[in-house]
Amino acid sequence: MLESLLVPQSVAVIGASRTPGKVGHEILANLIEGGFTGEIVAINPSSEEILGRKCYPDLKTYGGKVDLSVISVPTKFVESAIEDSIKAGAGSVVVITAGYREVGPEGARMEANLARLCEKHGVRLLGPNCLGLINAHHKMNASFAKKMPLPGNISVFSQSGALATAILDWSAERHLGLGKLISIGNKADINENDLLATFTEDEQTRVMVGYLESIVSGDEFIRVAEAASMVKPVVILKAGTTQAGTKAASSHTGSLAGADIAYGAAFHRSGVIRADTFESLFDYATALAMQPLPRGNRVAIITNAGGPGIMAADAVENSGMEVAILSNNIATALKKKLPAAASVGNPIDVLGDAEPDRYVTALNAALDDNENVDAIIVILTPQAMTKPAETARAMAQCLRGDKPVLACFMGGEDVMPGRDELVASNLPDYPSPERAVAALKAMYDYSAWRHRPPRVVTRFPVNRRRVERIIARHLRSQTYNIGEVKAKEILRAYSFNVPPGSFAVDAEEAIDIAERVGYPVAMKIVSPDILHKSDMGGVKLNLTDANDVRDAYDLMMLRIGQRAPKAKLEGVYVEKMCARGREVIIGMSRDPQFGPMLMFGLGGIFVEVMKDVTFHLAPITADEAMQMLKTTRSFALLKGVRGQAGVDIGAIANGIQRISQMVTDFPHITEMDINPFIVGPMGTEPVAADARISLRKI
């Protein structure tokens, strides 16, 4: 896959330059100095020779076949350069030149023309507006970056050329090898999905790393990324995910579901390891590239200083992992071999005067404890007697390849020799315990994802025809907000428990309904122009007799008429009051890239102020629905704390699955929420007390 791009036997540089510092000069120089063993064809109509290489005015004059063309000429000449490359047999072209979609509509039109031209002839296009690409294993630097990395097993794609050069500089400083580095630029053709699929099949790639500002196709990305993550780790830093500029949403779910949350949900579904910073991008990648995945989340900590050991233990617990409790026989063995003042609990403190032999003793003990230790973090601080390089070499001799071992050599100049030895020995090293723990947590989460149970989405028996009729009527009348009355009909069709009630057009009809369903009742305004009823005084609760109903109706119509004189007031909805219980909110907002995002949170201040909510892409499994609940900070309240009874958590998960089925069945639904969804003790049926649904044209 993408063979002509990644392993060409001949490369043409169209726009090669005699002037150092010019892009065309640097690309040609990089190919030569990088040791590329294939044919290098320099194209420049004004030169006969560049850097000791014969130069041709065009590919037609050259007359031979090329596999790859790297084009760095002014915008007006790019299309003809691609045409010449196609005639010369190129399977791929790289357009370095900028001035396309990123500059405006005319540039976008020209870019589309390039993409169509390449597609017509079956030629793959990288760029435009990109840095180029590097394949260290092929000794090919077809970019204008300064450095050629050492060959390694981490392959990188980046939407930013500048970040790609920073990655190269970082890898050189850390003496860390890279496999492929590809700048994808404007992604007129080749994009992240192509490269994920390619790197998945590439035997020289162990870890995939990406920097993205946008994703071309959300559905395809999830499919390709999930397939890739099942084979090897994918670590991505996603930028440009704030909510600035997004439309105002009508539902609670829509207002809480920003672009960043959508990408997070997509990454979680597909097994992508998300990095929040440039440092964490390679903190995670190096650990995944160098060490095996942990089998569990129990961590042993070895340190020569108490403070850093405590910092590591705190970080482990705060991450949701566990500080391992060592087996009794392991602790006993450590007591015999370490000084009396050493701590043989966890953290294992080998004391400040520890030489390499103590680290070896502690590390071997932790590696031997297969019943209780899944991963190990080794901390070293520079004391007068510390030997960082020797300790690193001794640690490397202990590795067995069955448990991850991460190092944290804290300090600067004094520990630098040890850090160099760690990298050479495939031991990832971090400057602080917190960063080491964060990398280990990323490894554990990925390992847990790899071993998750098969995804089985439950299908519930529902009345789809009833929902189809309601939605069709609203679409025909161009009414895109479904009010509470019809929204609850839809929920009933999907087997939600909805309080008995009915629509009334006057006070007397409201009284009749109240007496039929039984007091106390709730009364709510019905208007296509009022979405947030409570804000307008359109909700009255605990009405206990006919006089309450009549007074509430008259007062509601008067006040709403004053506050929203242009609103069409169709009547009221009267329903029986629900039993008390825990109020939660469940809903959905349809993301333009990734489709329906399901939301769960506690009601009241938890959703309005604390925004303690969680999202997951539909369709959802029972296990995933339960995990949604567990990831909220307020999950303990649902289970029950300090003598308070818990609620039926499984019933909430069931409701989320039913919403998942509904919004998957009906793509016209763009937003919805049930708020509140009132949940009682185990064995009771939750009640959908209020609901809102919004539609879209398709």
Image (cartoon, grey):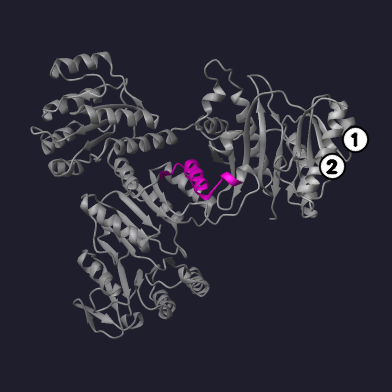
Residue at 8% of width from left, 32% of height from top? 385
Residue type, mark 1 in image: Glu
Left or right, 459 with respect to 382, comes to: right
Q: Quadrant of residue 499?
A: top right
Quadrant location of the C terminus in the rendered image: bottom right
Dot 1 crowding, Cα within 10 Å, few <14, some 14–19, many 20+: some
Which disc, if any, is residue 403?
none
38 is higher (above) or lower (below) than 564: below
Which disc, if any, is residue 571?
2
Dot 2 crowding, Cα within 10 Å, few <14, some 14–19, many 20+: some
Circle 1 residue: 509
Q: Main secondary structure of the magenta part?
A: helix
Residue 579 visible: yes
Residue 620 visible: no
Residue type, mark 2 in image: Gly
628 is higher (above) or lower (below) than 225: above
Left or right, 448 with respect to 484, comes to: left
The answer to whether residue 361 is magenta is no
Helix, strand or loop at disc 1?
helix
540 is higher (above) or lower (below) than 281: above
Helix, strand or loop at disc 2?
strand
Left or right, 400 with respect to 695, comes to: left
> Does the residue at mark 2 contact the one at mark 1 (Cβ under 8 Å)?
yes
Magenta region, residue range: 255-274
| Residue 243 image position (x, y, % from top left) | 52, 52
Residue at 20% of width from left, 43% of height from top? 423
| Residue 307 image position (x, y, % from top left) | 23, 29
